[in-house]
Structure formats: structure tokens, C-alpha cells
Image: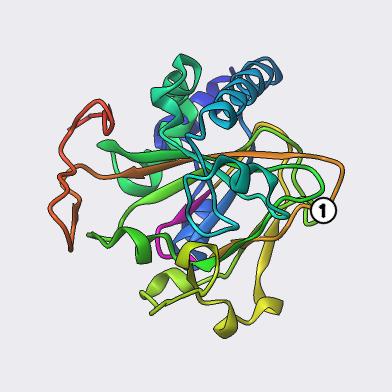
Amino acid sequence: MSTSTIAKQKMSPYRYLTQEQIDDFNINGFVRIGKIINDELVDKLRKEYDRIFYEAKESGNFRNLSIDDTEDLNAKINADEQMLQIMQMSERSINFRELLYHELILDIAEDLIGPNIQLFHDQALYKPAQHGGSVFWHQDNAYWQCVPAKLVSCWLTLDDVDVTNGAMHLLGQSHLRPTEHERTKKAGGLLDIGHTVDKNSATIVDLPAGGVLFHHCQTLHYTPPNNTDRQRRAFAIHLMPPGTRRLQGSESLEVSFSRPLLRMRA
């Protein structure tokens, strides 16, 4: 590393992002980072991902977000559309647990929400080839109801992702205010605000395997169906500053095995 590069790094107030990227996130509510996970680790995570979903399909311990919530295994695995979700992958795999502490992921998160970082939760979001279901337009915090609304999500893909197989669509500046959502009449009553979204204004983020994007918890986003011959394996890490709480309910957001403190600097 050159002396000038070291000097530049010391002058920057940020650990990974540039001022332009910080400004872009603050204005639009998301930032595309690109590939930060090397191919060796991607391959290891793919094998774990596939193993966990194979076991989940045997036990029924997963959700198909494309249909009404049910314990009927046959209904979940034989549905025409499949948007499969497993919560807390980090509690099922040491490799995904270690991924929570990935230095670059935490450096980017620190640039966005500050030096103290706690896990809110993580989840795998899998769109199988040919019949992968969509995820409706929504703001994450419409589900979570967290305050202050300073959570960010690291959305990581283990496959090359583009508009044809389920790339993320995001609406710039939608994070600036919470939006009222409606419950759908299908898919278990998931939140949906798609009828009010100007879809032509959305940004579609293509990513290579091992690529990430970060978005604010109030950024409106959507992923389309996957009707290609390629699967789309994504993993989301939702991060928050310690002290975040929920407006409703009695669930504690205290540090725990499920919600570890991932970095503390102050």
C-alpha cells in the first residue's frame, strides 16, 4: 500500500465508504457496494445454504411467503410459487454465524449507523429456479416498528442476480418517511404498497455472487419472480444501533445469542 493511500485513509472519517456513497445513501436510502465476499467463501456459504434448505424441507421448518402461512409441508413445497424464508440462519450454521462478523460488512454498517452495531435478525430468502415467487413492495420497518428508525439491511446474494431472476428493486428517497401499508388478501396477509409505487422510478440493482447492497429500514423495495433456470439465493443481515426498541409488543431487543453485539467501539 502506497504512502499516499495510507494518508488518504487516515484523512477519511469513514472506514470503507466514500463521501459520495454516504451522500447517496442519505439521499436515496440505499447504496450498491458490489462484490466483497470472495469466491471461496461464496462456495462454502452456498453449500451450507443448500444443506439447511434441504433439511428444512424435510422438517417443514421454513416459510413459503408466496402462500398463506401454514404448517402443511406439502402445501409449502408443492406450491406453484415459492418464495422461501428461513429466519436466523446464523443459529443453524457456524459459517453464517461468522459472516455476521465479516469485517467489511461491519465497516460499511459502521459508516452508515455508527460504531456500535447489534444484530436485529438475519434471514435467508430463496427463489428457486422457474417458480420463485415475488416479494411485494414494502418498507421493512412497517413490519418491525422499531425506533429510532436507523436500522440498515445488508442484502447479500450467493448467485449472480439481475432483473430476470429476482434482483432488488428500490425506490429512492422513500426512506425519508414511513408509509402506511395494506395487508394483502393472499400470501399470509403480507404487507404490500405496490399499488401506490411509481415502478418506473425504481432502481434495479444487479449484483454478482458475493455482492451486497445496503438499504435503510424505510426504503421501499421489491423483488420480482424468478422464472429463469437459475436459482437466486439471498441472505439478509438486519443491523441496528444498540438501544433500538419496538413501539409495540413486549419483545426485548437486549443483547442476546439471537441478537449479539457485533461491534462496539464507544
In the rendered image of this protein, does residue 22 appear above or below residue 38? Answer: below
Residue bounds of the magenta highlight? 214-219
Instruction: Report if residue 104 is visible in the image.
Output: yes
Counting from the top left corner in percent of width and height, residue 66 is at 60, 57
Q: Quadrant of residue 49?
A: top right
Q: Quadrant of residue 199?
A: bottom right
Mark 1 lies on residue? 227
> Residue at image x 48%, y 62%?
188
Counting from the top left corner in percent of width and height, residue 239 is at 36, 43
Q: Check residue 217 for magenta coloring.
A: yes
In the rendered image of this protein, does residue 154 appear above or below residue 27? Answer: above
Q: Check residue 38 for magenta coloring.
A: no
Pick whichever, 146 or 176, lies toward us.
Answer: 146
> Residue at image x 62%, y 42%?
74
User: As shown in the figure, which amino acid type bears the numbered disc 1?
Assistant: Asn
Q: How many marks?
A: 1
> For the N terminus, which image quadrant?
top right
Badge 1 crowding class, 10 Å Cα cut-off, few under 14, some 14 to 19, many 20 or more, is some
> Residue at image x 47%, y 54%?
69
> Residue at image x 45%, y 47%?
153
Q: Quadrant of residue 42?
A: top right
Residue 255 lies left or right of residue 178; in this view the side is: left
Counting from the top left corner in percent of width and height, residue 40 is at 68, 14
